[in-house]
Amino acid sequence: MKKYSLPGTLCKGETVGKGERFLGYLVGPLGFGFLSLMVNSYLNVYYTDVCGLGRLWGGSFMSVYPILVKGLDVLTYLAAGWLVDRTVTTQGKARPYLLLSGALLPVSALLLFLVPQGNDFLTAAAVLCSNLFFFAVVATLYGTANTLMVPLSSTDPRERSQLAVTVNAQGLLTGTTLAVVFPAVILPAIGVDQGRWITVMVCTAVVAVPLLALQYLFTRERVTEQEQAAGERRPKLSLARQLRCCAKSRPWLLLMAYFLLLGLVNALSSSAVFYYCSWVLGSYNDGITQVLFYAIGNLPMGIGVFLCNPLCKRLGRTRAMVGGLLLSCGGLGVCLVFPTSLPAVLAGQFIKAFGTIPSTYLASVLLSEALDDVHAKSGVRCDGFTSSLYNSMLTITSGVAVSLLNGGMALFGYLAPAAGAIPTQPQAVRGFFTFCQLGVPLLAYPVLAALLYGMGKSQGSVKAAAKEAA
């Protein structure tokens, strides 16, 4: 099979070095991190509070369009995984799509905010098309490739664990930056002025370009290179065949169920956080409540870079992850008892975040081990298929979450603010935001803990069997 030549990686070592870890997995992905957090955290706020789309066609458009976009996105993620598994280049099978999507991401993200006014049909068409281009095409290509960077970087479990911690530290860095800088400084300055929102997005897109280039240049697919050097030919399996291969692995099945539920919980919380902080916990766009909610409530995640590995060594990985999620339930319970008290909610969020340290930082490791287990049981690697399915689940849960949020806002009578006029929200709306932000995670975390426990038992049984066979 012909290999197509692309710009080479700058990572020349056979093991993952500090430069690769820092530039390829921490600094480089900040480009997409900034863009995706702007889109995932504030695009719906921009549509409802700045563009007034909550009133479009009686509120039905904002409830329906996310499902349409994400439904198609599921199909394109499966197609992207199919492409990755059949791609052969000098730079691997996934990294070429980092390069392609990196060139398109800033432009497609900016188009999301260019919403024409004055004609309902033109407005709806522009929103739908720009969302399809960003989510169903460009972000799909990037997400499929990016998910595979840790599993394909090395076969060394220690190196994978280090990269997994770095990846999550990068996510924390982007989240903290936007969670502190945006609501404290930028949001109060731009208010509900559409032109200022677009200017901010242009600046974010410009910053993202060199960062995305760094990610491509400072990553390397050593696992793919080893397969190519050994002359291994990946069989061209159908999606149905790959699904059957993956279904032989119990850890893989449990992990996909875990990611599906976790994706829905995180998407709903992320979509609702601005509304909860503005209408329940504090006052609208006050520049401080959301900053404190993120900064203090998520402070343990920063410490988690140093605590994750020691905690897992001392308690055992499964026990640390399961026990941590149950501890998080206690923190969420404190928040729900006092949902309007800022000190109580911050304390509860601190406990909740501390409990999620092991499960958050080791997600990439769990995925790597599940892919290895599939390979061991079926004899084939289903990396692209698993990546596309994983991202498809995150995509559809994101669409469902936004649809549920917008549908609930329309159902309970959400009142959008206007320049100089901040309404008082009905109690039903405030209760709905509280349930989305706090109640849903409290219900879901025990189930997530049970799934992690099942994965731990399955992996323990596999290791014991392998030891006996040896």
Image: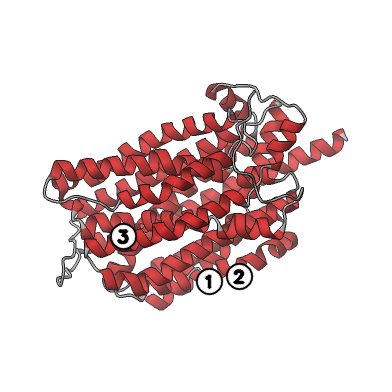
Mark sitting on residue 185: none
Q: Is residue 136 above or below residue 309?
A: above
Q: Residues within 10 Å of mark 1 (few under 14, many from 20)?
A: some
Determine which residue is flagged by label 2: 303
C-alpha span from label 2 to label 1: 7 Å
Between label 3 and label 1, give the one nearer the viewer.
1
For residue 317, what is the image quadrant?
bottom right
Q: Residue 64's spot in the image, x, y percent?
A: 26, 41
Q: Are marks 3 and 2 in contact (CB under 8 Å)?
A: no
Q: Is residue 228 visible?
A: yes
Q: Tag 3, which secondary structure?
A: helix
Classify mark 3: residues with Cα within 10 Å, few (<14), some (14-19) or many (20+): many
Is 301 on the left-hand or right-hand side of 286?
right
Most foreground residue, 191 or 283: 191
Q: Quadrant of residue 24?
A: bottom right
**In which quadrant will I find the C terminus?**
top right
The front one of 296 and 408 is: 296
Extreme residue toward the left, this view: 118
Q: Secondary structure at mark 1?
A: helix
Q: Position of residue 82 (x, y in %)?
A: 53, 29
What whole-number distance in Å separates the C-alpha atoms at marks 3 and 2? 29 Å
Residue at horizontal 25%, vertical 48%? Answer: 407
Q: Position of residue 200 (x, y in %)?
A: 33, 63
Side (left or right) of 14 relative to 93: right
Task: Quadrant for the N terminus, please.
Answer: top right
Residue found 50% across the figure and 68% down from its top: 298
Pointer 1 residue? 299
- Amino acid type for the residue under numbered disc 1: Leu
Identity of the amino acid at label 2? Ile
Q: Earlier in the sequence, mark 3 or mark 2?
A: 2
Q: Which one is in front, 444 or 262?
A: 262
Q: Which residue is mark 3?
A: 433
